[in-house]
Image (tube, helix red, strand yellow):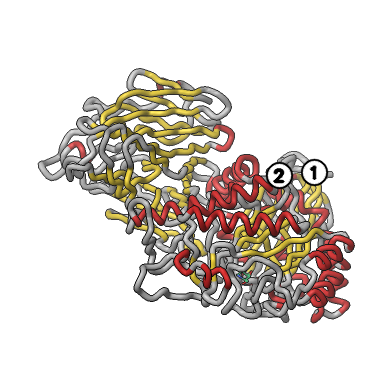
């Protein structure tokens, strides 16, 4: 597993895959192969130099370039577009040098240079061999004396096996309806997914999976990729006239510009690509392991069962009400009590207060300490909600600094939820927020922070920008990252949860800062099962915070609601004072079951057995890494009678070991559970949790 160079080719091998690129006869850096790893390094295909078809399809347009720049007779979607100071808008890249850095995570750097202008482009490929993943990013360096305007600078273009038809899987949605799974065949032309909202957004997720129409959950070749960026992004899936399929990902070029000053380097966000022959399930598990083992700030911690008081008290918080809730929460086994919105200066409703990050003097006359002390006495940790990027016009902060918000001077500022966005591209704004939140964390024993962001951008002006004001899109996100990193470094034990009105910022970029994501404001369990399944395509269960609430159908059995939330990191969000004693007793029982099985759920292998998108009866399984213990969840939402219940085929068992399944008499071999399957009878709105144990 390494990077080897053979004449004009570089072969990048991971545990099961190989990615090959090389220089063609005309000096272009082109893609050669991304598929199964072969036993002999010389078995990979040769580099092909394209020949033109006609004056309309010259070689430049037909080449499968690793990183095409806009130049020459080339009409495919390029990765790089720039304007030089003399007005030339053509970047002709020529290979200069290669650098291979060996180690656990081998790195290949390929430097290219414009043939006439002082601009260099370095393509970087880092291998994560165990996960069959490649991380790609690009560094653009201005080696001249005049500024260069970058107008598009993507992270990667991924090429797929030629002359094949591909099915494109992607996730789309909206507020309270995130992560819906879409599948469509790519046809000639370009399919674009993007965000123009300043965050990665609820609407599309910067992730894709591609197969040749034959992959399922267990088998089949799947190529997949995701962009580690929490701002505007773009995915362009192109099928050319010659049936060449490629997917590019990177910063959105819509309204984007970056003035690259002499001597400066612009580095793109990282884009990760992977290949598996183990179907969609295999692609998800590779990403789950990678995220858990390589990305999350606190590594493989077991997440605590939390209680969040938002749906119970909304803005109407007081020391008394929170202590009453905390006492009930502690009794049912909650380990972390989170005070959501409504605690800070002037926050009695959503019209006021954002920006003034100190406890409201009326609600908390002695600060947060009395509440935190009581929560800690009850044996729980204390967590708090903040929304640091936002400001209400009715706040002390806005009255002092009305120009700190993103806006065009002299034009109206559209409010959403009565709030405006602080310009985190401005270092003064970042410093103010760092000071305020640092003070909050230093003065109070806070062990968990939920960082929220409840609107999208409008009127994206930055009047005192030092460079091109369109740099806002990138500099804002860099500001968010910097503030968050600074606070994390000063308070390393605090666990952070990312939220943007639910899953509006659920991307790999934020997962270097946050250990968890609040997936959706929709906690109605049947809808939630679908959202959770979409989420699982790329994210593991440990980062998926899932509350049990009374939203939607409170008539659904508590057992069903608990089971749905136990598929992730369990939380409770219902108004506990409104729950009957029997409900609290039942919840306590499920919480204690969850505590026993959470290592399997949060850190095991997940198998989507029957999809809730496709059937009113769904099943999901989690199996410990050693294949000893597992958990099966089954849900029936709605099926018309007489209903034939699907057979459930377990996965991830050792075929020769003997297992028992709770609630089903008899012991069977792993292969019997996996190949002959089982049925679990449920009526509408019923669910089941069954432990799987190796005997
Ligand atoms: C949106 C979040 O998704 C909710 O959970 C809650 O924190 C509210 N914001 C509070 O304003």
Position of 232 with respect to 30 (left or right) is right
Q: Report the quarter where the C terminus lies.
A: top right
Q: Mark 2 — residue?
A: 300
Q: What element carries label 1?
A: strand
Number of marks: 2
Q: Do the residues labelled 1 and 2 touch (CB within 8 Å)?
A: no
| Residue sitting at x 63%, y 50% | 487
Q: Mark 1 — residue?
A: 658
Mark 1 / mark 2, whichever is N-terminal: 2
Residue 1, compared with residue 411, is above or below; it is: above
Quarter where residue 359 is shown: bottom right
Instruction: Estimate the x, y position of residue 308 in percent, counting from the top left.
Output: 73, 68
Position of 538 with respect to 95 (left or right) is right
Instruction: Estimate the x, y position of residue 572 in percent, counting from the top left.
Output: 75, 68
Residue placed furthest toward the left: 55
Q: Which of 396 and 156 is in front in this view?
A: 396
Residue 615, compared with residue 128, is above or below; it is: below
Q: What element carries label 2?
A: loop
| Residue sitting at x 86%, y 70% | 327
Position of 350 with respect to 542 (left or right) is left
Position of 221 with respect to 340 (left or right) is left
| Residue sitting at x 44%, y 38% | 136
Instruction: Estimate the x, y position of residue 570 in percent, counting from the top left.
Output: 73, 61
């Amino acid at each position: 597993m390494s990077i080897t160079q053979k004449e004009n080719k570089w072969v990048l091998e991971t545990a099961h895959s190989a990615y090959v690129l090389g220089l063609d006869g005309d000096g272009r850096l082109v893609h050669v192969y991304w598929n199964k790893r072969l036993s002999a390094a010389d078995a990979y295909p040769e580099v092909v130099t394209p020949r033109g078809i006609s004056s309309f399809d010259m070689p430049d347009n037909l080449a499968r370039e690793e990183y095409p720049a806009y130049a020459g007779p080339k009409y495919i979607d390029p990765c790089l577009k720039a304007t030089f100071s003399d007005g030339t808008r053509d970047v002709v890249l020529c290979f200069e040098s290669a650098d291979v850095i060996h180690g656990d995570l081998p790195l290949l750097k390929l430097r290219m240079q414009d043939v006439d202008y002082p601009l260099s482009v370095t393509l970087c490929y880092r291998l994560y061999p165990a996960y069959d993943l490649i991380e790609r990013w690009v560094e653009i360096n201005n080696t001249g004396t005049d500024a260069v305007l970058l107008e598009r600078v993507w992270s990667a273009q991924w090429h797929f096996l030629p002359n094949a038809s591909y099915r494109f899987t992607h996730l789309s949605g909206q507020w309270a309806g995130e992560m819906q799974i879409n599948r469509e065949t790519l046809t000639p032309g370009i399919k674009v997914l993007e965000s123009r909202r300043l965050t990665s957004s609820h609407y599309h997720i910067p992730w894709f999976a591609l197969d040749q129409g034959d992959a399922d959950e267990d088998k089949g070749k799947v190529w997949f990729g995701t962009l580690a960026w929490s701002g505007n992004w773009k995915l362009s899936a192109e099928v050319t006239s010659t049936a060449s399929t490629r997917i590019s990902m990177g910063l959105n070029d819509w309204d984007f510009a970056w003035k690259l000053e002499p001597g400066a380097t612009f580095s793109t966000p990282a884009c990760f690509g992977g290949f598996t022959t183990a179907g969609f399930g295999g692609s998800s598990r590779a990403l789950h392991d990678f995220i858990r083992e390589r990305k999350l700030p606190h590594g493989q911690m077991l997440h605590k069962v939390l209680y969040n008081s938002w749906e119970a008290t909304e803005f109407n918080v007081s020391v008394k009400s929170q202590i009453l809730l905390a006492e009930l929460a502690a009794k049912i086994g909650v380990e972390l009590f989170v005070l959501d919105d409504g605690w800070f200066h002037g926050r009695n409703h959503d019209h006021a207060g954002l920006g003034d990050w100190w406890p409201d003097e009326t609600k908390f006359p002695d600060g947060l300490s009395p509440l935190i002390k009581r929560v800690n006495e009850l044996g729980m940790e204390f967590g708090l909600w903040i929304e640091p990027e936002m400001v209400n016009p009715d706040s002390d902060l806005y009255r002092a600094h009305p120009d700190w918000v993103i806006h065009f001077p002299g034009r109206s500022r559209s409010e959403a939820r009565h709030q405006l966005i602080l310009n985190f591209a401005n270092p003064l704004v970042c410093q103010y927020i760092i000071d305020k939140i640092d003070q909050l964390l230093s003065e109070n024993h806070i062990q968990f922070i939920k960082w929220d962001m409840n609107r999208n951008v409008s009127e994206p002006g930055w009047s005192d920008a030092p460079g091109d004001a369109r740099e806002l899109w990138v500099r804002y996100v860099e500001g968010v990252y910097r503030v968050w990193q600074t606070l994390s470094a000063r308070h390393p034990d605090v666990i952070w949860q990312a939220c943007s009105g639910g899953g509006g910022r659920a991307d790999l970029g934020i997962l270097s800062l946050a250990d968890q994501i609040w997936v959706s404001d929709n906690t109605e369990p049947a809808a939630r099962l679908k959202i959770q399944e979409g989420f699982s395509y790329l994210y593991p269960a440990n980062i998926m915070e899932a509350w049990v609430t009374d939203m939607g159908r409170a008539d659904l059995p508590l057992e069903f609601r608990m089971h749905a939330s136990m598929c992730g990191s369990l939380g409770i969000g219902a108004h506990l004072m409104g729950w009957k004693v029997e409900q609290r007793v039942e919840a306590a029982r499920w919480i204690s079951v969850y505590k026993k099985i959470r290592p399997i759920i949060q850190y095991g292998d997940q198998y989507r057995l029957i999809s809730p998108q496709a059937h009113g009866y769904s099943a999901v399984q989690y199996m410990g890494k050693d294949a000893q213990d597992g958990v099966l969840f089954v849900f029936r939402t709605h099926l018309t009678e007489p209903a034939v219940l699907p057979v459930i085929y377990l996965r991830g068992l050792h075929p020769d070991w003997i297992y028992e399944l709770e609630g089903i008499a008899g012991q069977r071999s792993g292969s019997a559970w996996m190949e002959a399957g089982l049925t679990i009878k449920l009526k509408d709105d019923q669910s089941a949790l069954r432990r799987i144990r190796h005997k």
